[in-house]
Image (tube, rainbow, N blue to C red):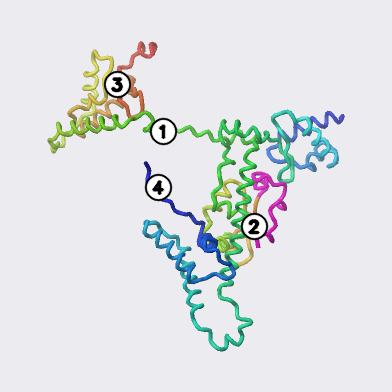
Amino acid sequence: MTLAEARVIVEGLIFAAERPLSAKEIGEIIGLDQPAVEALVEEIRRQHMSGALAIRMVAGGYQMVTKPELAPWIEKLGRPVVHAPLSAAATETLAIIAYEQPITRAEIEQIRGVRSDSALTNLLDRGLICEVGRKEGPGRPILYGVTDKFLEHFGLRSIEELPLKSIGQ
Amino acid sequence: MGYVVRLEVYQGPFDLLLDLIAKNEVDIWDIPIAAITEQYLEYLYSLQEKDLAIAGEFLVMAATLIRLKSRLLLPQDTQAEVEEEECVDPRTELVEQLLRYKFFKEAAGFLQERYGEAARFFTKGQQTELVNLIPIYTQPAGDLTLDDLREAYERLRSEEEKGQAVHEVLARVSLQERIALVRLQLVGRPRLSFRTLLRECSPGEIVGTFLAVLELVRLGEIRVVQQRLFGEISIEPYTWEVEVNS
């Protein structure tokens, strides 16, 4: 396998994957180490400079996307369900889960001061959060956490990209 | 011209309290409980006046505020005065809750911003999830003028006057009879308006005629054409020639 061939394979893998693909995963498939994969991706990126597609780093992996300046055109095709606006209640709930995970519904409601079951259902339906276990104690309530889809949809490479908690307090 | 009621929407009692504190430009660690409680209750009353339901959580907070207010009003007993150094401000717990909520509200703002940015990238998989909602209902106001409405109203009025007699006798309406009637009226006519068919009909007969038309459409004997929304419905005999020509 030449370097040029490897580059084409990497590009194909990122294109075909349904989710962001990490350099480690790609490396395991084609038998190269992580820095080699990263270098190949850099080259692919350069090749894409003049095209419609770009490779973005999100949720710890690479993802092929259309360039942001194309958004106004692509939106004319229709707006994807995943881009449907999130309500203020859902976003607040999501923020609490992202910072405090794993967390129960009761704990979320304690912070928000209002019932949050419909916001939770909404977030579960969108796949932005999921059940991550049960809390020990009476009733063994469900614990929630954010998913990799959450990172993807907010364009975050990892959970560490959230603003520091100390800033707000 | 619409009548617009502007009402601030709060996510919950904390949200409302934070807004009141911001509007009053007071220090969150030194909330003037009496004044804030008053404004908080005012907001709830304004909701009540507009007949809007108040969520239970808002009432719980109102009770908390009133309790705080009364605790602050009561003279502290001497023993408490002695231990004043250690005496915890009764507002502390509320303030901590408020600050905690405030942080997440701001974090939500950050997420909302990122969400909008990230929505400018499209991936291949999303293509299958596109929502292409094409409404099958179009706004009637489109090409409908005020004159159209007045005409429709006058037509109804004149028909109402003509048919002053109340149909008291409940006559049995036979569907077969109505079908035969529609067929008969269509003989030798290229088309017929649905309204003509309903002329001088009792409510029962209107229903019967309507069903007769549906039945004839099902049988393929007629077709029904409406040029525009809420426009005249015309009934045409359905033949293969008609289909070929059109």
Magenta stretch contains residue A155: yes
Which mark lies nearer to you, 2 or 4?
4
Q: Chain of mark 2?
A: A
Q: Quadrant of residue B102?
A: bottom right
Q: Which residue is mark 1?
A: B137
* Magenta region: A147-169
Dots 4 and 3 on the same chain: yes
How packed mark 2 is, by other alpha carbons closer than 10 Å (few <14, some 14-19, many 20 or more), is: some
Mark carried by residue A133: 2
Residue depicted at 17% across the width and 28% down the height: B200
Q: Is residue B188 magenta?
A: no
Residue B44, position as x, y percentages in the image: 42, 62
> Between marks 3 and 1, how big is the CA–CA gap?
22 Å
Counting residues from the N terminus, which is met first, the one under dot 3 or under dot 1? 1
What residue is drawn where x is 38% and y is 11%?
Answer: B245
- Name the element at disc 2: strand
Q: Secondary structure at mark 4?
A: loop
Which kind of residue does numbered mark 2 sit on?
Answer: Gly
Residue B49: percent from left, percent from top = 36, 59
Q: Nearer the viewer, residue B238 or A51?
A: A51
**Neighbourhood count class around disc 1 (C-alpha, 10 Å): few under 14, some 14–19, many 20 upward:** few
B51 to A67, vertically: above or below? below
* Labels 3, 1: front one: 1
Chain letter of the residue carrying label 1: B
The quadrant in which residue A166 appears is bottom right
Find the distance from the CA under tag 4 to the CA under tag 3.
Answer: 43 Å
Residue type (three-letter) at the residue carrying disc 1:
Tyr
Which of the two labelled residues, at mark 4 and mark 3, occupies the earlier sequence position? 4
